Amino acid sequence: MVKRDLVKYISIILAFVLGIWALNTWVFETVTVTNQMSNTYLKKGDRVLVNMHASLHYGDFVLYKVEDKEYVGRIIGTSGDTVRYMDNILYRNDEIVKESYLSVNTETEDFQVRSLPNSESEKIGKNQYLILNDRRSNQADSRTFGLVNRSQIIGKMTLRILPVNKIGFVETGMDEE
């Protein structure tokens, strides 16, 4: 009886560990926000679940990889969009975008999709994304790397799991469109 119970409990624990491992391998990844990744909504030291299979939309925070280094940024443009910055104003598909999530006095240099590295078109290509940091002084984003391919995006920053007092879905501060 005791031996059967022991085998049962070990089986349950093993199944639980394997389940967590499988989720972490194929569905979620966790990332600790570094100072370079931090912004108004994600602080240094936050631990965040990244959903590797979530659909990606304008305004989402994503974890992506360029040249074997991971970065966090906000999707500013998606496939088919035209995006430009002029006189510190963001235009997406020729409409002004209010960026209330940025800190006051944030300056962004003028650019357009065509002026980004390795880009030859006014529109963002299929399965490509324009990603910017909310801390615009940190130009480790599409302004330096060019458009980011879907295959480079690890996933969408979905759920903050640490610190415990801030557990919850990752807020983006986006106004409803």
Image: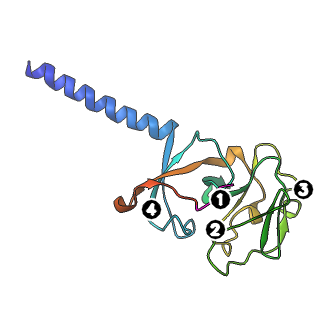
Q: CA distance from mark 4 to mark 3?
A: 36 Å
Three-letter code for the amino acid on which mark 1 is drawn: Arg
Q: Residue at x 87, y 64 (%)?
A: 115
Q: Tags 1 and 4 in contact by the CB under 8 Å rule?
A: no
Q: CA distance from mark 4 to mark 2?
A: 16 Å
Q: Which residue is mark 1?
A: 74
Examine the structure image and report whether residue 28 is included in the region drawn in magenta. no
Three-letter code for the amino acid on which mark 4 is drawn: Asp
Three-letter code for the amino acid on which mark 2 is drawn: Asp
Q: Tags 2 and 1 in contact by the CB under 8 Å rule?
A: yes
Q: Which residue is mark 3?
A: 122
Q: Which residue is mark 2?
A: 134
Q: Residue at x 91, y 54 (%)?
A: 121
- Whether 14 is drawn above or below 156: the answer is above
- Whether 117 is drawn above or below 5: the answer is below
Q: Position of residue 89 (x, y in %)?
A: 78, 71
Q: Range of the magenta residues?
A: 173-177
Which label's residue is closer to the chain start, 3 or 2?
3
